[in-house]
Image (cartoon, rainbow, N blue to C red):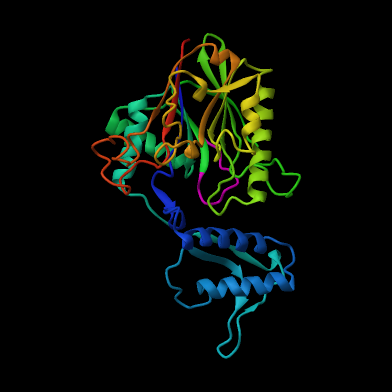
Amino acid sequence: MRIATYNLENLFTRPSAMNNDSDAEGREAIEDDAELNSIIRKATYSGVDKSRLVTLITKYKFHYKNPPIKPIIFQKIRGQLFKKPANGPLEIVATGRDDWTGWFELRKEDVAWQATYNTGRVVAETNADFLVVVEVENRPTLVRFNEQILNSVFNLSYPHVMVIDGNDDRGIDVGIMSKFPIGMMRSRVADIDPVTDFPLFSRDCPEFEIDIGGGNTVIVLANHFKSKRNGDTEASMERRGRQAAGAFAYANAALARSSMVVLAGDFNDTPDSVPIAPLFDSATFSDVMNHADYPVDRPGTYGTGLPSGKFDYLMLSNALWSKLDTVGIERRGSYHPNTWEPFDTVTSTKSEASDHHLVFADIDT
C-alpha cells in the first residue's frame, strides 16, 4: 500500500498575488485582503476601522468607476460600504456588517496547462493508493483533475475524491484522493484558537477513515499549517505551534479507533523549529524522514530540497511504521535542472507542477 502527500499549489486557478513568493506586492495584497475582510465582518465599524478602510480602498482604487486591474477585487451585492462625492473625500457610509452585503477577494488567474499536466504526471508516476492533497481549489476542481487529467491523459483514476471547504477563502484547501472507500469524515473548521478567538486551523484538519479491506481502517489527518509567506512573525510561529499541537492531539485520539493513523501534509516548518519540533519527540508517531531510504543529502521537500525547505510530512503511527518498507520523494515535477533532472515536460518554472515535492511511503500489508 502506497501513501503520499503533495502540495499541488492549485490545479487550474490561483490567486495572482500568490504566484511569486518573492513578489513583495503580492505578499502585501494578501495581507491587505485579509485585513479588509477582517474589518468588514465586524458588527460595528469604529473610527479607526473606517479610516483604515478609506486608506485601503483608495490604495486599490475600488472607488473608481472602472477600477484598474489589481490583485484584489471588490464585490458588492447590496447597500453601500462607501461613497465618493464628486467634490469631496471618500467616506465610509456603512456603520457595520448589517448595512451592506459584499466582500473583498483575491483576483485569480489560470494556471498554465503544462503545469497542470505535469502535476498529473507527478501523481501518475507515483500512483499512490491514497494521496493527501494540499492547496487544491475545491472538490469539483479535484474531481475535474481526476477525470480530465489523471484518467483521460494518464489512465489513472481515483474513485474516491474528497475535499471539505476550509477556513481559507483563497481556494487553498486540503483533501484526499483514494483508491479505497472513504468512510467517516470529520472537519475541524469550527475549532477556535483560544489565543486569537479566530479559527485554529488556517485551512482545516479534516479526518478521513479509509477502508483498506479485511476489516482494517487507516485514519488520515490532512493538514496545511500557518504559512511563512507574509513574514514569519512570533505570532505566526505561535499559531503554527498551536495548530501542530491540535492536529497531533487529534491524531493521538484517533488511535483509539484504529492503530493505523497518518498525520500528513504541509506543516510549513522544519522539524527542528520551535512550532513543530515537539511532534518529533513522540512515542506514538514517526515521520518517514527517519527511514533509512529517506535522502539525507537533500531532505527538503520544497525548492532545491535543502534542509531549510523540509515542509511536507508523512507521520505514521507505530502500527504503520512497523510495516514501512520504502519511502521516497518525487522531485521531477519541480524545475531545478542544475540539481536534478526534471521530467522532459518540465522546461521552466512556469511549466513545473509545483515548487513542492511529493513524499511517499510504501507499507507492507
Q: Residue at x 53, y 65 (%)?
A: 75
- Where, quadrant-wise, is the N terminus in this rendering? top left
Q: Is residue 170 magenta?
A: yes
The correct choice, above or below, for 58 with respect to 345 in the image is below
Quadrant in the picture for residue 90: bottom right
The correct choice, above or below, for 105 with respect to 360 in the image is below
Q: Position of residue 235 (x, y in %)?
A: 67, 50
Q: Position of residue 308 (x, y in %)?
A: 49, 39
Observer-nearest residue: 220 or 300? Answer: 300
In this picture, residue 71 sits left or right of residue 257: left
Observer-nearest residue: 85 or 325? Answer: 325
Q: Position of residue 103 (x, y in %)?
A: 58, 62
Q: Position of residue 226 (x, y in %)?
A: 59, 45
In this picture, residue 61 sits left or right of residue 280: left
Q: Residue at x 57, y 63 (%)?
A: 32
The correct choice, above or below, for 365 with respect to 112 in the image is above
Read off the magenta span: 162-172
Q: Could you tell me what secondary structure mostly forms the magenta stretch?
A: loop
- Whether residue 70 is visible to the viewer of this picture, yes or no, is yes
Q: Residue furthest left?
A: 344
Quadrant in the picture for residue 301: top left
- Whether residue 81 is visible to the viewer of this picture, yes or no, is no
Q: Residue at x 66, y 39 (%)?
A: 241
Q: Is residue 69 magenta?
A: no
Observer-nearest residue: 17 or 338? Answer: 338
